Amino acid sequence: MLWLWILIAVVVILAIVFFSYFNRFARLGNRIDNSLSQIDVQLKRRADLIPNLIEAVKGFMKHEKAAIKAVTDARKALVSAKDLPGKVKADKGLESALKTIFAIAEGYPDLKANTNFLQLQGELTTTEDKVAYSRQFYNDSILAYNNLCKTFPGNFFAGVYGKKAGEYIKIAEAEKKPVKVKFD
């Protein structure tokens, strides 16, 4: 009779451990999905601010149509991107186009003083901070998930449940180079 109780206790403990690890993988997977969703929300917010920024800039920058078109095209690419690598690539294009607009704005004192432009520029800066935080949260979530997948006994359960390590959001090599500032 004692052996039966010991066997039942072992089976119950093993079941609890298996369910516990299954639930940990589920929670971490949900956190990763949530963090990706947060990145999407912030990128959408930025994409929604762009048309307002363009309208504020158009009146002042009549001769800068190429820069305005570049921002508009980059926004379209971001909105139409379907997967994470596509969104990251489109996001980089939009960041570059926005930097061009803000650099050109330096040559238009009336635009730099325009309340709408300043407010939109502030909102975009805040959104950039939120995008950076969302990316960091995503990578932190991937770190926790990967730690579970690669450490014992999590690696055993990862194999049992068919879980594989996740991918971090990576920065392109071109963006790692130092920025050169030149004054003429």
Image (cartoon, rainbow, N blue to C red):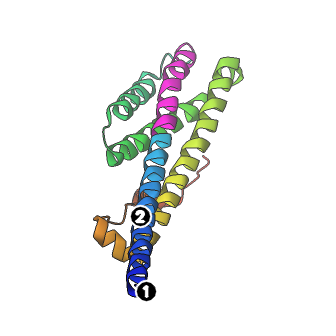
| Residue drawn at the location 37% of the way across and 60% of the way down | 167
Task: Give the Cα separation between the discs numbered 1 and 2.
Answer: 26 Å
Q: Secondary structure at mark 2?
A: helix
Which numbered circle lies on residue 19?
Answer: 2
- Can residue 108 be seen here? The reply is no
Q: Is residue 160 part of the magenta span, yes or no?
A: no
User: What amino acid type is highlighted by mark number 2?
Assistant: Phe
Q: Secondary structure at mark 1?
A: helix
Residue 6 location in percent, x, y?
A: 42, 83
- Label 2: few (<14), some or many (≥20) within 10 Å? few
Residue 103 location in percent, x, y?
A: 57, 35
Q: Where, quadrant-wise, is the N terminus in this rendering?
A: bottom left
| Residue drawn at the location 41% of the way across and 64% of the way down | 19
Direction from residue 127 to residue 33 in the image, left or right: left
- Can residue 56 be seen here? The reply is yes
Which residue reaches farthest bottom? Answer: 3
Relative to the observer, which residue lies in front, 153 or 74?
153
Quadrant of residue 79 within the rendered picture: top left
Direction from residue 180 to residue 154 in the image, left or right: left
**The residue stretch that appears in magenta:** 40-59
Which tag is nearer the camera, tag 1 or tag 2?
Answer: 1
- Label 1: few (<14), some or many (≥20) within 10 Å? few
Q: Earlier in the sequence, mark 1 or mark 2?
A: 1
Q: Are marks 1 and 2 in contact (CB under 8 Å)?
A: no
Vertical placement of residue 163 versus 9, above or below:
above
Which residue reaches farthest front? Answer: 1
Relative to the observer, which residue lies in front, 10 or 173?
10
The residue singled out by tag 1 in the image is 2
